[in-house]
Image (spheres, rainbow, N blue to C red):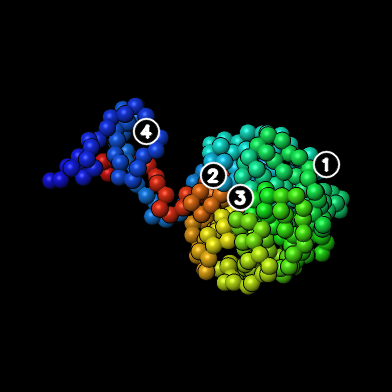
Amino acid sequence: MTKYKEIRGSQIEAVSSDPSNPVEGQVWYNTTSNVLKGQAATTAGAWSSGGNMNTARNNMGSAGASNTSALVFGGAPPGNPAPALTEFYDGSSWTEVNDLNTGRFGLAGDGIYTAAIAMGGGADPGVYYNKTETFNGTNWTEVNAMNTGRRYLTGAGTSTSSLAIGGFAPPHTGVVESWNGTNWTEVADIGARSQLASAGESNTAAIAAGGEPPSSGTTAVESWGGSSWTTVNSLNTGRQALKGSGTSTDALVIGGASPVTGKTEQWNGTNWTEVADLATARIAIGAAGTTSSALAAGGENASGTSITTTEEWTGAGAGVTRTFTDS
């Protein structure tokens, strides 16, 4: 019989705590919990429970590189003034950090925790902001405004190279603006719609998916190459009030309606594939990350209630620790 040492070149270690960076195939015995564990790779992507947000809300802005470093800001239910709350997620819990300068809901966000951007949004009654703010990991600073104020837009890119896409002005608009870190410039429009999802790495590479009209949500997807929008393969499920994460060629779209769903689809640059659903169906979430490590936070459930629930996405092929049992 081949022994573990002959396969791995080392014996099974007895340790008091799990290794911080185990490699695939590594096995160890945890003397604190008295269990045998090993590191494997996931065969399919999956959602798991994360820490709850401090304040329930929907239609917030969001940014972040992964499910261990994410930011949500603003949101609804709308008040007067609208919420300016900002929370940071470290992979286990949410912490309130410094507020936006202007509270709003239906805003968009891009970037990472230490370099994020918030754009547009609104307040009641009938306010449609063109305001833009950037976040440096500590404070929000108001910078040059968009040309067109709107709610329920989406964003793609970084804090210095971003797009503001579509929204509700009113009416639904296809206006797209490009941000270079200093100013906004209007570029080619998409099909007019709001409450759509997007993903992208810069103001020259992005996709925009779903949204309304129609009120049941469209399957339409458009790709941006820096100068024009091109229609590409559609979503499997039409919806609005969904959110996206990732890049223009490797993305997720998450949740949405109608009806309220937890469906998640993954884009490989050519086609959309349905993957694992959220445990809690919802719309208007905060989303961040990549197809390997993403986050879905808050939103509104099928009962119309704003929630604090957070779910973490681990993509196929990612490392996962397994516990061996007798069964």
**Mark 3: which amino acid?**
Ala
At mark 1, the secondary structure is loop
Q: Considering only order in the chain, which callout, 2 or 1, is on the residue closer to the N terminus?
A: 2
Q: Quadrant of residue 220?
A: bottom right
**Mark 1: which amino acid?**
Pro
Mark pair 4, 1: CA separation:
47 Å
Label pair 4/1, CB-CB below 8 angstroms? no
Q: Which residue is mark 4?
A: 18
Q: Considering only order in the chain, which callout, 3 or 4, is on the residue closer to the N terminus?
A: 4
x, y (%) of residue 56?
67, 42
**Mark 2: which amino acid?**
Asn
Disc ID at residue 67? 2
The residue drawn where x is 28% and y is 29% is: 14
The residue closer to the viewer here, 308 or 44, is 44
Q: Which residue is mark 1?
A: 81
The residue drawn where x is 72% and y is 47% is: 118
**Mark 4: which amino acid?**
Asp
x, y (%) of residue 59?
70, 50
